[in-house]
Image (tube, rainbow, N blue to C red):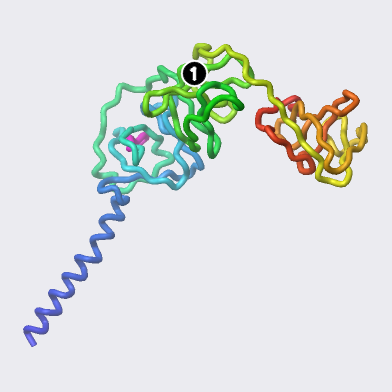
Amino acid sequence: MQRLTTFLSLVLVFALTVLSAPVASAQQGGFGGPSGTVINAQALNARTTPSTAAGVVAVLPGGAAYPVTGRLADNSWFQINLFPSTMTAWVSGAYLSVIGIESVPTLATTGPVPASGSTAVVTTDFLNVRSIPDPYVGQVRIVSAYGRAYPAVGKSSGSPTWYEIVLTDGSRGWINGRYANVTNAASLPITYTGTPTPTVATGYVTAYFLNVRTEPNPYVYNIITIIARNQSYTVIGKNASGTWWQIRLTDGRTGWVRGSYFPVNNGAGVPVTYNN
């Protein structure tokens, strides 16, 4: 009986040891140390120093977890490792839930430091980084993803503004400023003065008949003509939301058609000509 009791005790100790291992790992967030999860925000700025005046080095998605490597004494800011890279950054403690906070070292800081340079953070799911600021002849260097941050070192002189960035391998490329959040953009020098290739965009009618209007508004009687299915036209503009296209008719007049009945090629490069 004594042997059976001893055996059962050993089995119980072994089971408790096995079960406690993943719990400890979970408490540390799976990184082998303290971890923080982004909460109460769909996107959180990670900065060079613990200050809202500091430069943004990355935008973190809600729910993402990162190793925590330091904190301010009042836990108002935490230093994290931008896993899987080795770069560190600071995030506001108001938007970070930290596990294992008692083992996070308190770091000294020199106080708020404004961004000394310019940073470009990608604000679209995928963004082409090109060899020159031209969407038609600029060779695609890489395709970047939402939230990636790069040092910005220059900008174009045309419209829309393109920004010259430094890639992780030290080389440079260009991104369309419409799809990036750029800090200190006004202080960047103009490093490209060439003229981008003019946009040549065309579209065709998919409805049996499509109204062409004087402005992108379907609720007033402003029809200037009706065009038919499969007819194609040159596109010269679009509204700010990209739901209407401004076209040039065969007699030289211009008008607006609904984008849901008028697919357009090269539509991304068409300028916005109606902002209301």
User: Residue 210: which quarter of the image?
Assistant: top right
Q: Residue at x 40, y 17 (%)?
A: 116
| Quarter of the rendering occupied by the C terminus | top right
Q: Exactly how many numbered labels are in the figure?
A: 1
- What is the chief secondary structure element of the magenta stretch? strand
* Membership of 184 in magenta stretch: no
Q: Residue at x 91, y 25 (%)?
A: 251
Above-or-below relation of 133 to 143 = above
| Quarter of the rendering occupied by the N terminus | bottom left
User: Residue 49: which quarter of the image?
Assistant: top left
Residue 13, position as x, y percentages in the image? 16, 70
Q: Give the labeled residue for mark 1.
A: 184
- Most distant residue in the left direction: 2
Element type where label 1 sits in the image: loop
Residue 61 shown left or right of residue 82 in the figure: right
Residue 64, position as x, y percentages in the image? 42, 46
Residue 96 shown left or right of residue 263 in the figure: left
Residue 83, position as x, y percentages in the image? 34, 40
Residue 175, position as x, y percentages in the image? 53, 26
Above-or-below relation of 137 to 61 = above
Label 1: few (<14), some or many (≥20) within 10 Å? some
Q: What stretch of residues is rendered in magenta?
A: 74-81
Q: Label 1 is placed on what type of residue?
A: Asn
